């Protein structure tokens, strides 16, 4: 038993000590906790692994001290289930007192955590999810990945400018798919092209045969495709099996379809696919070469994909924001510091739009080619500083 | 149009091979084995590992998938399943679904969660024109293999001594035992064969359906639909049901894409309302 007097004396001593030392050094010892919520098991585990490897790589390269404060990572696995994401976010904010929430592999997961970020006044760094509306769900959400529409619109411009007159769209029937379909269609028709058909494939669809047959019957110049990254390989195989490439149909793909993580395993069927995205492991810059080499070492030989670069840049954003605030980690100050931040990422120059807190970045048009024996998305055109077109179109 | 029919048939054939084993365990042995998809997944992974890691040709990998999955099925039947034959259906469901989750976690741990890809031999890739109908070579191959499997199964079940013993064991276990039929042995062999078929289905389906650790959950519904619509009493029931569902699914997605994902479920509801025991149920 501790008697009351000794507690009072002790408390007084602590208070006196704090008064003498001043408030700053006390705060300096206090770590900045980062709650990283990712799908580390289940169907989307590859997303989680890419991001976690990249985040740890960044901390290894840049030290775990920023502006005098140690940065601590608390990693949680949400298995890709939105209600679990919400519960974990709540636990991290309330019990672990994290200063920042980060990760979020899929749109529903990011949306589930948004109310927690708002109520807890904790910045939420979205490193992967790609639906436009996400950043509108909380003033504390900042995104370092991309939006599906942002990656798509430049492809519509490219198609219209390169002799493609009619296109059939084939997208997976969920929010990012519908976003890309709408973005592609409005831009492509505005540029004088026609969309001959819009096909929506159910999310859990094992066989593309009927959809590809429909596309073949409509005889467009090109087929625009957006499917979640894991399904891309299956799609490409069935496309090739049907002989549509020989029939003169080009595949235009949102970059997730030719995901760097899986591209090499797809084999020659993927050759020649034109896609648009913000990151390719083959991006030609010294910064990216260093990043790819370091990632391969850290990730057991795996190639970094666009998820990894989102995680890497998310950590960079947090580190720079902490430097700017001098180590202060309250939510509003951090978000304020992140707004308008610009830097050179492995993917090229990027910045955070101060109005929407969404990322502004170059979009590259790439073609799948064999480089040094491996399949890569080789960039051949750049559209600089693209903003999310969905939010830009709103008044 | 004919191409569509052809694609539907090939899809239905894959569904049938995948579900054939389930219709045997569910219909003949009266055991609800939700872990059936896990055996199919095992077959798929055997093929992937054999082809990509050991360079086994595709045609040799198929029997390998059948045999290894059958062996695993036999082992599990002898050690685990046999304890659940007499238990209630709820126990069986809980047990087998638990097995599914363990299989998913184990495969995820051992092989990673990404899609597994195989490369078919060149003579199975692409398509040819047959009387003006474009026909995929691999899909024709599937139809041929499955056709042979159906005929062989039907013959075994109706024309051999083993088949008649199996039917006897199912109709009345006690009397069959009394007549000196080794019911345990027959059930074990049947279970192993069913698992092996699922493995073969998984191996054949890898190219068309894709393969990742969530495979058993993704396709559980499809297996169950095929078996319920087909009725569990015969081999021909699930076979025709699988063809019907395959064709309806492909045609539905082609002609009414907005409604495409629901076609097979609607079909299932209609069939079950009209014939609660399935299309081809035996009179009970």
Image: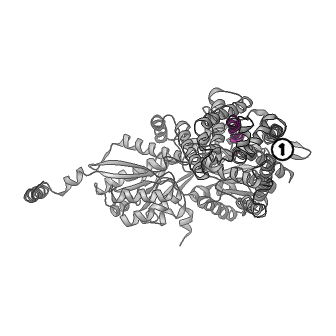
Q: Nearer the viewer, residue B233 or B66?
A: B233
Q: Quadrant of the C terminus of chain B?
A: bottom right
**Residue at image coords 48%, 63%:** A135
Q: How is the image coloured?
A: one colour
Q: Quadrant of residue B74?
A: top right
**Residue at image coords 53%, 66%:** A391
Instruction: Please name the predominant secondary structure of the magenta segment in the image.
Output: helix
Q: Quadrant of residue B65?
A: top right
Regarding residue A340, the answer to whether it shows in the image is yes
Image position, residue B283 (x, y; %):
80, 55
Image position, residue A88 (x, y; %):
42, 56
* Label 1 crowd bin: few (<14), some (14–19), many (20+), radius 10 Å: many
Image position, residue A286 (x, y; %):
47, 39
Q: Residue furthest right?
A: B131
Q: Is residue A153 magenta?
A: no
Height in image: B250 above or below A264? below
Chain under disc 1: B
- Residue highlighted by disc 1: B135
Disc 1 is placed on an element classified as strand
Height in image: A349 above or below A300? below
Image position, residue A53 (x, y; %):
45, 42
Q: Which residues are magenta?
A: B182-208
Regarding residue A370, the answer to whether it shows in the image is no
**Residue at image coords 49%, 44%:** A50
Q: Nearer the viewer, residue B83 or A210?
A: B83
């Amino acid at each position: 038993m501790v008697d009351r007097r000794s507690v009072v004396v002790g408390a007084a001593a602590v208070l006196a000590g704090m008064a003498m030392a001043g408030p700053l050094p006390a705060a300096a010892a206090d770590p900045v906790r980062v709650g990283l919520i990712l799908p580390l098991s289940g169907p989307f585990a590859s997303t989680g692994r890419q991001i976690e490897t990249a985040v740890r790589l960044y901390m290894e390269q840049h030290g775990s001290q920023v502006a005098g404060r140690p940065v601590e990572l608390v990693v949680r696995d949400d298995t890709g289930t939105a209600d679990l994401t919400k519960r974990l976010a709540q636990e991290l904010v309330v019990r672990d007192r994290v200063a920042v929430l980060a990760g979020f592999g899929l749109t529903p997961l990011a949306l589930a955590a948004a109310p927690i970020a708002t109520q807890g006044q904790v910045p939420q760094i979205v490193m992967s999810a790609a639906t436009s509306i996400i950043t509108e769900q909380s003033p504390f959400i900042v995104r370092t990945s991309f939006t599906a529409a942002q990656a798509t619109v430049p492809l519509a411009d490219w198609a219209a400018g390169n002799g493609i007159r009619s296109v059939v769209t084939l997208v997976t029937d969920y929010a990012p798919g519908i976003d890309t379909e709408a973005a592609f269609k409005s831009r492509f028709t505005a540029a004088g092209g026609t969309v001959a058909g819009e096909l929506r494939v159910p999310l859990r669809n094992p066989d593309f045969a009927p959809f590809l047959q429909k596309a073949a019957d409509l005889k467009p110049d090109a087929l625009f495709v957006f499917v979640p990254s894991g399904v891309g390989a299956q799609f490409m195989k069935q496309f090739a099996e049907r002989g549509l490439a020989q029939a003169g149909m080009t595949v235009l793909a949102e970059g997730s379809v030719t995901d760097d993580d899986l591209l090499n395993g797809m084999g020659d069927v993927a050759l020649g696919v034109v896609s648009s995205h913000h990151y390719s492991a083959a991006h030609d810059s010294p910064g990216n070469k260093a990043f790819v080499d370091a990632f391969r070492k850290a990730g057991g030989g795996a190639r970094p994909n666009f998820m990894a670069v989102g995680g890497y840049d998310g950590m960079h954003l947090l580190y720079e924001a902490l430097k700017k605030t001098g180590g202060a980690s309250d939510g509003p100050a951090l978000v304020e510091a992140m707004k308008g931040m610009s830097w050179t990422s492995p993917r090229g120059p990027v910045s955070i739009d101060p109005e929407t807190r969404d990322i502004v970045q170059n979009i590259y048009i790439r073609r799948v080619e064999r480089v040094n024996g491996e399949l890569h998305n080789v960039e051949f055109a750049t559209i600089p500083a693209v903003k999310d077109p969905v939010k830009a179109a709103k008044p | 149009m004919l191409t569509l029919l052809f694609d539907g048939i090939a899809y239905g054939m894959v569904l049938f091979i995948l579900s054939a084993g389930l219709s045997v365990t569910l219909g003949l042995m009266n055991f609800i084995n939700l872990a059936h998809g896990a055996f199919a997944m095992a077959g798929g992974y055997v093929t992937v590992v054999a082809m990509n890691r050991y360079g086994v040709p595709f045609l040799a990998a198929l029997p390998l998938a059948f045999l290894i999955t059958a062996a695993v099925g036999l082992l599990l039947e002898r050690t685990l399943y046999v304890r659940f034959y007499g238990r209630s259906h709820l126990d069986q469901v809980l047990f087998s679904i638990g097995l599914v989750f363990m299989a998913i976690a184990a495969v995820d741990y051992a092989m990673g969660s990404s899609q597994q890809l195989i490369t078919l031999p060149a003579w199975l890739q692409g398509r040819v024109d047959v009387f003006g109908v474009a026909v995929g070579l691999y899909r024709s191959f599937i139809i041929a293999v499955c056709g042979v499997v159906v005929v062989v199964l039907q013959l075994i079940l109706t024309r051999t001594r083993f088949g008649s013993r199996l039917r006897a064991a199912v109709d009345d276990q006690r009397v069959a035992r009394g007549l000196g039929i080794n019911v345990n042995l027959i059930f074990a062999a049947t279970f192993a064969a069913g698992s092996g078929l699922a493995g073969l289905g998984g191996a054949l389906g890898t190219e068309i359906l894709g393969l990742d650790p969530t495979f058993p959950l993704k396709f559980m519904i499809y297996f169950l639909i095929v078996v319920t619509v087909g009725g569990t009493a015969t081999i021909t029931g699930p076979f025709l049901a699988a063809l019907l569902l395959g064709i309806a699914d492909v045609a539905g997605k082609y002609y009414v894409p907005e409604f495409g994902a629901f076609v097979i479920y609607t079909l299932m509801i209609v069939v079950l309302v009209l014939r609660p025991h399935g299309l081809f149920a035996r009179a009970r």
